[in-house]
Image (cartoon, grey):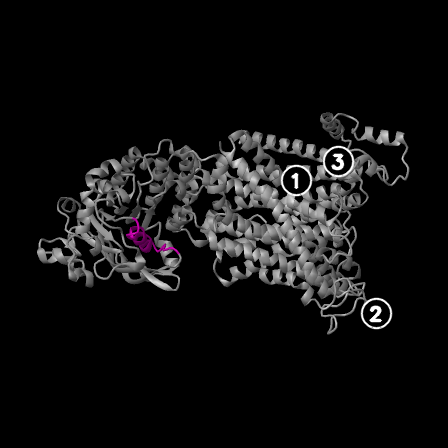
Amino acid sequence: MGRFLLRRVLTALATLVVSSFAVCMLIHLIPGDPVMMMMAQNSSPTPEQIARMRHALGLDLPFWLQYFHYMGHVLRGDLGRSIFGSEPVATLLLERLPNTFALAFTGLVLAAGMGMPLGFLAAYKKGTWADSLLMMLAVCGVSIPNFWLGLLLVLLFSLVLGWLPVAGENWASMILPAVTLGLTYMAIIARMTRSSMIEVLNEDYIRTARAKGMPERIVLFRHALKPALISVVTIIAVVFGYLMGGVIVVENVFSWNGLGRLALQAINYRDYPLIQGFILLFATIIVVISLLLDVTYAWLDPRVSVE
Amino acid sequence: MDAALPVSSDAALTLSVRGLSVSFRDGGAQVPALEDVSFDLHAGEVLALVGESGSGKSLTALAIMGLLPGGARVDRGTVLLESCDLVSLGPREMTCIRGDRMSMIFQEPMTSLNPVLTIGRQLTEGLEIHLGIAVATASARAVELLRLVGIPSPERRMREYPHQLSGGMRQRVMIAMAIACDPKLIIADEPTTALDVSIQAQIIAVLAEIRARLGTAILLITHDLGVVAEMADRVAVLYSGRVVEVAEAEALFDAPRHPYTQGLLSAMPRLDWLAAEGPRTRLAEIAGVVPSLRDRPDGCSFWPRCPLATEQCRREVPPLISTSDGRVAACWVRQVAA
Amino acid sequence: MVLLLVLLAIFAPLLAPYPPDQIGVASRLAVPGPGHWLGTDEFGRDILSRIMYGSRLTLYVGLVAVGIGLTCGISIGAIAAYAGRWLGGLLMRAIDLLYTFPDVLIALGLVAFLGPSLTNAMIAVGISVVPYYARVTYAIVLAERQKTYVEAAQVVGAGHARIIVRHLLPNVVPPMIVVASLGFSAAVLSAAALSFLGLGAQPPAAEWGLMLATGRNYIERAPWVVIAPGMAIFIAVMAFNILGDGIRDLLDPRQVERTF
C-alpha cells in the first residue's frame, strides 16, 4: 500500500510539472509576437509598456529560464494579472471555483447515481429486452451533444413549462446544468459498469459461490457487487476527466458563473495569463481528483491494500 | 442398457446418473453435447470420469450440479442423488442442495476464490446458510476445516485474502469449502491440473484422506491417467459426449475393452513425464482428431479413428452393454468378439 | 446511416432546395412548413439547406481531425512499442499524461492560443485525440511484437522499418478501423462543441455547432433553429458510434476497449 501510494503521488507530481511546463509554453503558440498580441487593445503601446509587459511575462529571459520564472510565481500563488481589469488571475479563478465545483460534483453524483444501478441491472438482465433498451439509450446518451441537450432542457422546462430558471446563481438554476451533465455522463458510466459487471459475473468465483449453494441475492450483492464496484471506481475516475471537459461547455450554455464561462471570456479577450491560469487550475483539479480516486481504489481492493 | 451397469451390493448408492442428455443452443440449432450418459457412484467410492477436452466431462459435472452455462440445457435423463431426482428440482431447491449435500471443487484455485472476500468469510457463509449456525460457531468450525485440509496456522488464514495464499493452499481452501457441510458427494473437476506436480500429490493425499475419514463419494473428473491410477476405484471413459467404457480401475488399466481406452492407455508410459502438458501429447498415439460436436459422425463417434471399425460401427451407435466377461463397453466389435 | 450521411454531403448542392447562404428578409425565422421544411433562421436562410451543406463541413472536420490523430497516434504508438524500453516508456508516459486530461480541455487550450478558426479547431481536436490512438496502437503492436512471426522476420534479418510496415501495420489496421470510427464521432462532437463556443467555424459558415450557437438567441421565438442542427449533430455522432460498435462486434469484441 505504501509503495503504491508513493508511486501514485510521484506520478501525479510529475504530471503536474509537465503540464505546467506545457501551459507555460502555450504562449509561444500565439501567432506573431505574444506581447504585441496582448497589447493589441492598446492602440499605440509605448516601448516602455512593451518592455514592462515582456518582463512581467518573463519573456525577456532565455527560453529555459522562462519556465522557472513562471513556476516561481505560481508556487507563490501568483498566476499573474489579468490583462483586462488587471485583477490577479488567482483571485478571479478562486472566485469561480466553488461554482464549477458544485456543478461538476452534482453532475457526477447524478451520473454515477443513475448510471451505476442501470449498468448493474443491464448486466444482470444481459440479453433481455431491458438490457437492449438500456444499451440503446446509452448509445443515444454518448452521442448526444451536451450543449444541445442543455438547450432542449431549457426549451422544455424553462420556456415551455416555466418550471426552472434559464440562468442564475441559486440552487434552482443549477438543476438543469447538473441534469444535463448527469444525463450525458450517466450513459458512459452505465456502459462501463455493465461491461465490468458482466465480466465479474463470468468469473470462476461466481460459479464457486453458486456451487456453494449461495442464494442468488448473496451471489449478487456479496460476491459480484464488491469486485464490480471496485472497478467502477476506476471508471468514475475516467469519467470525471470527461465530465470536467463537459463542464466547460455546459457552463456556457447556462451562463453558469464558473471557471468554464470565465475561460471563454478570457479566450475571447485574448487574456492569455488568465487562460494559462485556468488550464493550470483545471489540470491540477483533474490530477488531484484522479489521485484521490486511485487511492480509494487501492483502499477498497485487498489485492493492493494488504501488502 | 441400464441393467448392464454392475451394481456393487455392499455400498449404498449415492449418485445414479441415467440417460443424461445435454444440448447447446448454437445459433438456431440445438447441438447435442452429452448423449445418454449413465453411471453410478457409491458411498465412499471414487469414480473417475476420464476423457479429453471437449468430451463432456466438465459438462456432466455442471449438469449434475445444476450449474449449466447459459444456452445449455438438460434434454433427458435423471440424476438421482440418494434417490432424489435433481433434474426435476427447481432452482430454489437446488440452491439448498448445492454446497450442502453435494459440492464441487474447481480446476482453477487461482480464480475460483473471490479475491475481495476473506478466506473466513467464504468458508463460513456456506455453514451459515445451510446449517443455520451462528457466526461464532461457524468460524470455529471453519478453523477446524482448514486444519483438516492441512493448512498451517488456520486462525491467521481466516483473516487473509486469497491472493495471499499459494495455489496449493487455495486448492486446500476450496476443498475445505466443499466438505464444510459434510456432503454426500464431492465433484472434483480437474482438482490438480493447474498445480505444480509436487503440489498435485499433496492435494490428492488430502482428497484421499477426506474420503477415508468422512466416507464421501467423489466424482473425480480428469484427463490425467496418473491421478486416476492413484485415486480412483472405478473409471468411466467419456468420448465425444458418450460413455464408452466403465470398469474397475485396475481392470481397466490391465485390459481395456474399448479401442479408444486402449488408445488412451497406450500413451500412458509417457504420461508420467508429461502429466501437465494437456491432452494433445497423449493423443499423438491415436490417429485423427476428436470430432467437433457439430459434425459428429453417424454411428459410433470413434469409428473414423478406430482400427477395428466395421460397417455396423458407421451406421449404429453401440449401446453401453455388458460383455460376456462381465465388463462394460460400448463397442460393436468387442461385444461380438467377447 | 454513415453512408447516407456521406451521400448527403456529396450531393448537398443537388439536394438542397436553396443555396445555404441565400438571405430572405421577408421570411426571417419562418415556421417549418411546405416552403421551408425545417423553417428559416434569423436571416431567413433555409435551415434544411444549411444542414445539408453542414454535413460536408462535419465530415471534413471529422476526417481531418481523425487523420491528424491517426497519423500522429499510430506513429507515436508504433515507435513507442517498437523502440527500446527507455524511449518507448518516455513516449508513453507523455501520452498517458495527455490522456489524463479531457480532450475538450486540450483542444480548448490549443485554440485559445492559436486563435479561433475552423482550421485551428480541426488541428486542436486532431491533436487532442492523438493519445487515444497512440495507446491503442501501442497495446496492439506490443502484443503483436511478441508473436513468433516478428521474431522470425528479425532472425531472417529484416530491418526495423520493414518489420513495422510489412508485418505489424497490417495487424494494427482492423482494430484501428473501429477506433477511428468511434474517434470520428468524438472528433465531430468536440469540433461542434468548439464551434458552439465560438472557437471553431466562424459566421456565416453553415456549421452545425455554430448554427446552434447563433440560434440559441432565438430559442424562445423559433425553437426549430435550435432543434434541427442539434439533431443533425446527434444523428451524425450516433451513426459513427453505431458503425464503430458494429465493426467491433464483427471483428473481435474484446480487443478494443471503449473509452469514448
Which residue type does callout 3 highlight?
Ile
Q: Can you give x and y, in whole percent of width and height, for residue B239 in the image?
A: 24, 53
At horizontal 12% and vertical 57% (from top left) the residue drawn is B335
Looking at the image, is mark 1 or mark 3 earlier in the sequence? Answer: 3
Quick one: label 1, few (<14), some, or many (20+) residues within 10 Å? many
Q: Give the residue number, with chain letter if any, for mark 3.
A: A27
Which residue type does callout 1 highlight?
Ile
Q: Give the residue number, with chain letter if any, for mark 2.
A: C26
At horizontal 40% and vertical 37% (from top left) the residue drawn is C152
Quick one: label 3, few (<14), some, or many (20+) residues within 10 Å? many
Q: Can you give x and y, in whole percent of width and height, for residue A109 in the image?
A: 64, 49
Mark 2 belongs to which subunit?
Answer: C
Mark 3 belongs to which subunit?
Answer: A
Q: Is residue A185 visible?
A: no
Q: Can you give x and y, in whole percent of width and height, for residue C159 in the image?
A: 47, 34
Q: Secondary structure at mark 1?
A: helix
Q: Secondary structure at mark 2?
A: helix
Quick one: label 2, few (<14), some, or many (20+) residues within 10 Å? few
Give the residues drawn in magenta, as a range.
B53-69
